Image (cartoon, rainbow, N blue to C red):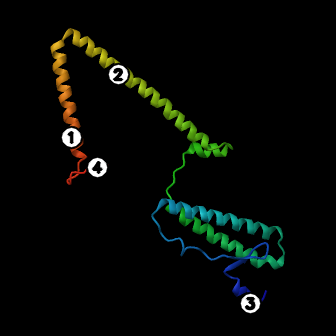
């Protein structure tokens, strides 16, 4: 390869099948965007690009000879640049992965098992809470029945106070959901 060809291919790499692949850094295309989904997509694209570069690098290394030293160095440089770009993009992403998910992946299990276990745990806790709530409602009903038999006048005034309080709470809730122009908040 003469010096004019070297200069022409300095920003590109030659693929394993003779294709010319651009090695230019995509930092101009990856502007600072605050959208988390966009940031994640940029990191995913960078990971895919790194995987492609690693594949090209492995092909170059597996068939290495003295003539392929320059393409090898170019691919190494482009890999380093893309890894640096990936790190910069990843710093914009704030993704928290539970340690249990990582442990499942390390154990060779499907991370969807974690999601299923969390949902089943939530359902079980919800059923326990519902049972406690139902028990307290039953206790309240039983106490009111007993109090009604023993102190009927006091229970009647309690129910009137309770009804007035509930009506006031409902009126306040409705007043807060009405906009100044009379429309209801959605």
The residue wearing badge 1 is 172
The circle drawn on residue 136 is 2
Q: Is residue 124 left or right of residue 165?
A: right
* Secondary structure beneath label 1: helix
Q: Which of marks 2 and 1 is in front?
A: 1
| Coordinates of residue 32 in the picture (x, y in percent) | 47, 69
The circle drawn on residue 3 is 3
Q: Quadrant of residue 23?
A: bottom right
- Closer to the chain start, of discs 2 and 1, is 2
Determine contact: label 4, label 1, CB under 8 Å.
no
Identified at 56% across, 45% down, the residue is 99
For this rendering, which residue is in front, 30 or 91?
30
Cα gap from disc 4 to disc 3, whole angstroms: 71 Å
Cα gap from disc 2 to disc 3, whole angstroms: 86 Å
Determine crowd level at label 1: few under 14, some 14-19, many 20+ residues with C-alpha closer than 10 A: few
Q: In this view, does 34 lie to the left or right of 10?
A: left
Identified at 51% across, 63% down, the residue is 38
Cα gap from disc 2 to disc 4, whole angstroms: 33 Å
């Amino acid at each position: 390869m003469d010096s004019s060809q070297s200069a022409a291919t300095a920003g590109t790499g030659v693929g394993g099948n003779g294709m010319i692949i651009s090695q230019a850094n995509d930092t101009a295309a990856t502007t600072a965007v605050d959208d988390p989904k966009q940031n994640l997509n940029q990191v995913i694209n960078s990971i895919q690009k790194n995987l492609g570069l690693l594949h090209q690098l492995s092909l170059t290394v597996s068939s290495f000879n003295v003539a392929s030293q320059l393409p090898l160095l170019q691919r190494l440089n482009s890999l380093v640049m893309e890894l640096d770009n990936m790190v910069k993009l990843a710093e914009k992403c704030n993704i928290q992965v539970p340690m249990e998910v990582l442990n499942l992946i390390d154990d060779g299990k499907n991370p969807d098992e974690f999601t299923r276990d969390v949902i089943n745990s939530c359902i079980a806790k919800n059923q326990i809470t519902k049972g406690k709530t139902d028990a307290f409602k039953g206790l309240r009903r039983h106490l009111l029945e007993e109090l009604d038999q023993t102190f009927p006048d006091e229970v009647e005034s309690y129910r009137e106070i309770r009804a007035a309080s509930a009506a006031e709470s409902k009126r306040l809730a409705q007043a807060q959901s009405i906009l100044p122009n009379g429309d209801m908040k959605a």
